Image (cartoon, coloured by chain):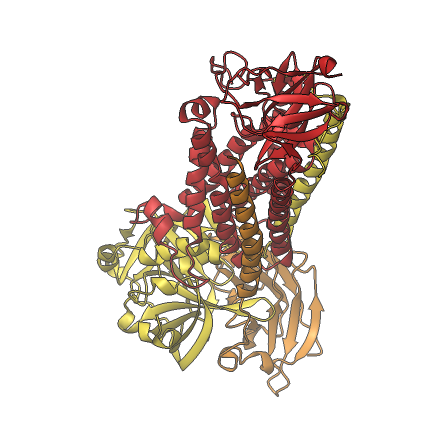
Chain colours: A yellow, B red, C orange
Amino acid sequence: MKPIEPRDDKDQEFFIGWEQKVPPRQKKFLYNRLIGIFTFAFLVAILLPALQVHYSQSFHYKNRLVNLEGYFTKNPLPSLLVKRPGGIGEEIPSYSIYYLSYPQKRAIPLEVADMYDSQWVSLRGTLLFNQSDTMIEVQPRSIDVINYYENTPPRPIIPEKSLGIHELKGELLASKTYLGATNPGYGKALRASSVLHVTGGIAPMLVINLPEDTTHEFILIGENNIPIEAIAPYVGTEVKIKGEVIVWGDKLVLKTNLTMINGGQS
Amino acid sequence: MSFSYKAIDWTPFKRAINNYLWVGISSYLALFTLASILFTPTISLNIMLIRAFGSAAFLLLHIILAIGPLCRIDSRFLPLLYIRRHMGVSCFILALMHGLLVIFTHHTGSDVHPLVSVFSSDSGSTISTFPFQAFGAIALGIMLVMAATSHDFWLKNLSAPIWKSLHMLVYIAYICIIIHVTMGILQTENSIVYFLLIFAGVTTLCTLHVYAAIKEFRTDFTAKTNSDGDLVETFPVEDIPEDRARIINLHGERVAIFKHDGKIYAVSNVCQHQNGPLGEGKIINGCITCPWHGMQYHPENGCAKEPSTEKIPTFNTVIKDGVVWVDHKPNLPGSPVKPAVIHEAH
Amino acid sequence: MIRPLRRRHLLFAVLMLLSLPLLVVFSFFKHRSNGVVENQIENLLNAEIEDFPLVVWNKPHLWTNLPELETQLLASVDIEARLAIRLSSVGSVHHPDILIYWSPRAYTTRSGISENMHLLGVYQNDLNPILELPDEIKDKDGFLIMYSLAMDEFVSEAPLNIPRNM
């Protein structure tokens, strides 16, 4: 039987921690490996960002406060309707629709929405947006009713057109995360954040990725224009939803209920 | 191994490696940030930092866990054992930054308590709803305990077996982190390179561990069988290098046979500090020195050099016709033993 | 004494080697793609694209500060000879709610968006990617103005020249 050979023969260098110097050959060996590890690490540091999914562009200009005036409506979801300037033909909606939210992961509280519904208001906030939609993160207590006295403008008319009942397949997200609360604002890693937004009252959004890098984004509302309760478990997942597709101004809205999601399965 | 506890026993080597470690970490974070800005300019700052710290901690953990088996395979890696704790604490710091940023970005600002949210917001039984963040939190908790008990003070006061068992939880943390990464970010990213990198890392690390484990396990079955009563024949005196040892397997345990100053000593191969292989060590200043952490023992009685109090079993030896014979029955730890004198035998 | 530890280590290492790489492979095969699907209601939303099959011209570098933005002037084939503008998607426009106007003259901050500027539509709106020129301006040269309503900010402009033989 062979004896168990020691790894080192008698001429091998030997180092212990409290010695001041590492033997030269061992030192050279280690530093060569260190160079290899550094090279690999720096390659990874460049590769990982380079190969990330290139997300759709969304922004949140947190450091820029804007003051806007418009018509506050709580249906189908809290929004500000802002008059578009210039000459506007009949086919083009004359108001821009900006969804409203409160800071962090909260929606406009119901009592605030009730208080300002159907009134002309001014408010202050920061903007979240992508190429299709804009949301204002309203500073609390910054909403003021505009008193036009006898010159109150007429109530805005936003054209609404139903495109019928359709079954759509896409990813269910929180509108605020998707529109720029974080970028990227979707994916598995962001699911917890999206769920918290939706449970805080932020409207969910169905995002359908189409060929050629286009998307359709549907704001999801319940029947009778009230939020769909218990939708949070579906957020951040791929879903099939059956509902009424409505074009509201130049926004897409999907009216549905919980039983119409994934065929009613939880 | 000293009773006057210092925060860190610095040596020029440790300082140099520590400096390289933090230069490496800082450079990694800087490069990652620059590359993120270049390739995904609209990425949120928080998300970018979460990924930078997370990936840095993940990569560093693989390097740390590779040190153990690499040292078993090639002794030239042994000096890295002295810096492994530094690396471990550094890894924890990176992971902590990652965790804090995640909590701040994703779990604050709602009515749910952030720590409750980590375990509850993203929970379900499908891949889309798998609670990957909970596994990350568990791993971070284990690393916190390990970082907090990393100093020799805890090794001494918890005792080596308990301390070692606590720090072996790093493998549970590693498994949790693999689940965290595969069920989290890998479900978000599409590039196959992400999967390949992680697959390569996991496979390499596990293969190193298995290889080192098999190597050690196999030698447990390489045993001497020629015996005369309690004495077992080992090998010729001239086959034992001066101030070094040969290791044999005696009835299931390894014994280190040292040659020093014309005498032969036999002691247990297992260092009482952290089970290092004494037989791969060297006699320095008349003491058997463990190759792992430098623990020293007097060969004539198996007692650790003062002020340490550890003791190892000794074995009686005899030289017959130039061959060393060892009594397979160990003496109690710390028992004085008369060495076999080479000059007399010859 | 140490053999049980080594045995445990070997067992654990083998279990890790067998399970962890499998977990990575499993996560790869379970990975969901980004879910690109065919347009499920296309024929109801983008009806106008087919109305303007003729490309009169296609010009890059027309817009100030947006050199990569391409502009197409499209025409219908019916007797009314309608014209429309189509803009390519560009990554560098970082403004919310960009409205596209036709203006008889270049934009000035002093005059802002006036009543003689015609709103053609919203930039990069997937519902209406074609911006039809109203009859009253379709044979007039002018300027296309990009204006961000939410930020009340001018973004860019481009000269619009209509060929005379249209």
Q: Residue furthest bottom?
A: C79
Front-most of residues C86 and B315: B315
Across and down, in percent, residue A227 comes to 29, 66
Across and down, in percent, residue C136 comes to 55, 75
Split into 4 quadrants, where in the image is the N terminus of chain A?
top right
Front-most of residues C125 and B133: B133
Number of callouts:
0
Quadrant of residue C90 in the image? bottom right
Across and down, in percent, residue A9 comes to 75, 27
Split into 4 quadrants, where in the image is the C terminus of chain A?
bottom left
Q: Is residue B337 visible?
A: yes
The answer to whether residue A165 is above or below residue B84 is below
The answer to whether residue B294 is above or below residue A72 is above
Give me the residue at 53% from left, 81% from top.
C47
Quadrant of residue A62 in the image? top left
Q: Is residue A89 visible?
A: no
Q: Residue furthest front?
A: B229
The answer to whether residue B81 is above or below residue C21 is above
The answer to whether residue B118 is above or below residue B73 is below
Give me the residue at 43% from left, 64% from top.
B126
Apparent side of residue A71 relative to residue B284 in the rendered image (left or right): left
Apparent side of residue C19 relative to residue B288 in the rendered image (left or right): left
Give me the residue at 52% from left, 58% from top.
B187
Across and down, in percent, residue A169 comes to 46, 73
Quadrant of residue C33 in the image? bottom right
